[in-house]
Image (cartoon, helix red, strand yellow):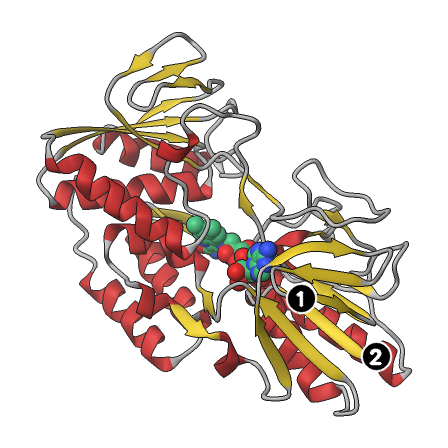
């Protein structure tokens, strides 16, 4: 049989590891990714500020997967669940089992104004480009108007890291965060909300909630409330979507995430399993799981186990994810919840680096993360 994994992120690599050890050699396993390396995406903001580099947050995929899993560096252009077929830029493959784990990419929700001048943070190339663009932008300016569309986890981390970089270069930073929601990070407790509100006041971040970007002429931004922000360095972090829509009869959320059953497979295609950011998975509270490294690793491993069970003729098992929590570092503070306990302040920044370090593929990367944590200057804004 031929088993294909598409996507070599946290989900795909964990599926490959699991199947490599529990499926016999008579079956062929392939992993397709457009890059030969995988990226520790939670550290992209630190690539922007320069605290970490490409080498610190990537690893060659072949080093992470079992040698019997064949790595194919190709871009997937089309997936057809009806035909059991994957089309890449180079080849057409037929599969017996498929793990769909292509992650997610930026969603502009139909916004079209000067897209090529908008900065995004969804992959390593994009993070490196934001840094280059920002350094060029601030060269000729003493005061920088940074505008971020989207005041969620990623938008706030990006804002904090650009603020960090601008401050280090001696610039006056005016940060404007714009979000459609009526509250910033609505999942926070009142205590954490008040805590970050005070910290953002110190850094003079402005939050325009219940608002959105109406126009961008390449330099100036017009908000829904009519306000104009001139000479802006503009970043978009307002949402994500699936990188491609497969052909077939399946249900999906508006952002493209594919709805799976309790075994992480599709109801209409029992040989197709979805893992990581690409999957819409219900948690024990009935709500969809957020996109996170831990859930991607767990779901990847689980689909690997279930495909092995199907091939080996044993019982497939329902997926029971455990939520270990989350932390958002915010330059001079952090908020989060780890194992049900709320985290605030600078210790959260240290924990962020150490937790990322533990997930960061190899000892060298782990050591660099710990150094970055120790070196963190904790400058007062
Ligand atoms: C800036 C940022 C910060 C984040 N911070 C956190 C955090 O602090 N904590 C946390 O838990 N999570 C965080 N996340 C989310 C977390 O990184 C994702 O949930 C996780 O990486 C998803 O894993 P995945 O394997 O599904 O997808 P990915 O890790 O995105 O991997 C998908 C793979 O598919 C490949 N691919 C995509 N399209 C194609 C194609 N057409 N052809 C071939 N290959 C393709 C990509 O190259 C990639 O290797 C963050 C994400 C971002 C972007």
Q: Secondary structure at mark 2?
A: helix
The residue positioned 83% from the left and 72% from the top of the image is 96
> From where the camera sits, is residue 332 visible?
no
State how far apart marks 1 and 2 are (Cα). 29 Å
- The answer to which image quadrant residue 233 occupies is top left
Q: Position of residue 214 (x, y in %)?
A: 45, 16
Q: Is residue 275 left or right of residue 155?
A: right
Q: Is residue 87 left or right of residue 352?
A: right
The residue positioned 83% from the left and 63% from the top of the image is 84
The residue positioned 66% from the left and 53% from the top of the image is 278
Give the residue pinned by disc 2: 309
**Location of residue 45 with respect to 198 vertically, above or below:** below
Q: Position of residue 68 (x, y in %)?
A: 64, 88
The residue positioned 43% from the left and 56% from the top of the image is 42
Assign the N terminus to one quadrant of the image: bottom right
- The answer to which image quadrant residue 357 occupies is bottom left
Give the label on residue 366, or none. none
User: Callout 1: 10 Å neighbours few (<14), some, many (20+)?
Assistant: few
User: Callout 2: 10 Å neighbours few (<14), some, many (20+)?
Assistant: some
Q: Nearer the viewer, residue 266 or 215?
A: 215
Determine the residue located farthest toward the front in the rendered image: 90
Q: Earlier in the sequence, mark 1 or mark 2?
A: 1
Give the label on residue 91, or none. 1
Q: Is residue 258 left or right of residue 192?
A: right
């Amino acid at each position: 049989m031929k088993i294909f994994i598409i996507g070599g992120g946290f989900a795909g690599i964990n599926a490959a590891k699991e199947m490599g050890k529990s499926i016999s050699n008579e079956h062929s396993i392939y992993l397709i990714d457009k890059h030969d390396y995988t990226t520790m995406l939670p550290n992209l903001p630190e690539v922007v500020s320069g605290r970490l580099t490409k080498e610190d947050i990537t690893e060659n995929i072949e080093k992470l997967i079992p040698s019997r899993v064949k790595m194919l560096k190709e871009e997937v252009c089309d997936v057809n669940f009806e035909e059991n077929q994957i089309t890449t830029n180079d080849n057409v493959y037929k599969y017996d089992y498929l793990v769909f784990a292509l992650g997610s990419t930026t969603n502009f929700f139909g916004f079209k104004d000067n897209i090529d001048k908008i900065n995004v943070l969804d992959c390593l190339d994009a993070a490196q480009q934001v840094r280059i663009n920002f350094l060029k932008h601030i060269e000729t300016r003493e005061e920088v108007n940074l505008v971020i569309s989207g005041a969620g986890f990623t938008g706030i981390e990006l804002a904090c890291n650009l603020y960090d970089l601008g401050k280090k270069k001696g610039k006056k930073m005016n940060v404007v965060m714009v979000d459609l929601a009526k509250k910033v990070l609505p999942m926070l407790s009142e205590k954490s909300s008040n805590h970050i509100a005070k910290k953002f006041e110190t850094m003079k971040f402005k939050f325009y909630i219940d608002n959105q970007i109406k126009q961008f002429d390449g330099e100036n931004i017009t908000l829904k409330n009519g306000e104009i922000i001139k000479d802006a360095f503009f970043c978009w972090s307002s949402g994500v979507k699936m990188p491609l829509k497969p052909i077939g009869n399946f249900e999906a959320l508006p952002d493209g995430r594919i709805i799976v059953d309790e075994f992480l497979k599709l109801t209409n295609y029992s040989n197709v399993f979805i893992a990581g950011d690409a999957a819409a998975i219900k948690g024990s509270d009935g709500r969809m799981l957020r996109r996170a490294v831990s859930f991607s690793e767990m779901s990847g491993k689980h689909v690997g186990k279930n495909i092995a069970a199907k091939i080996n003729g044993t019982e497939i098992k329902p997926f029971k994810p455990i939520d270990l929590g989350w932390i958002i570092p915010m330059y001079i503070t952090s908020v989060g919840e780890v194992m049900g306990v709320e985290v605030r302040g600078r210790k959260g920044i240290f924990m962020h680096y150490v937790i990322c370090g533990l997930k960061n593929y190899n000892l060298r990367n782990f050591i660099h993360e710990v150094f970055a944590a120790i070196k963190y200057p904790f400058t007062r804004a």
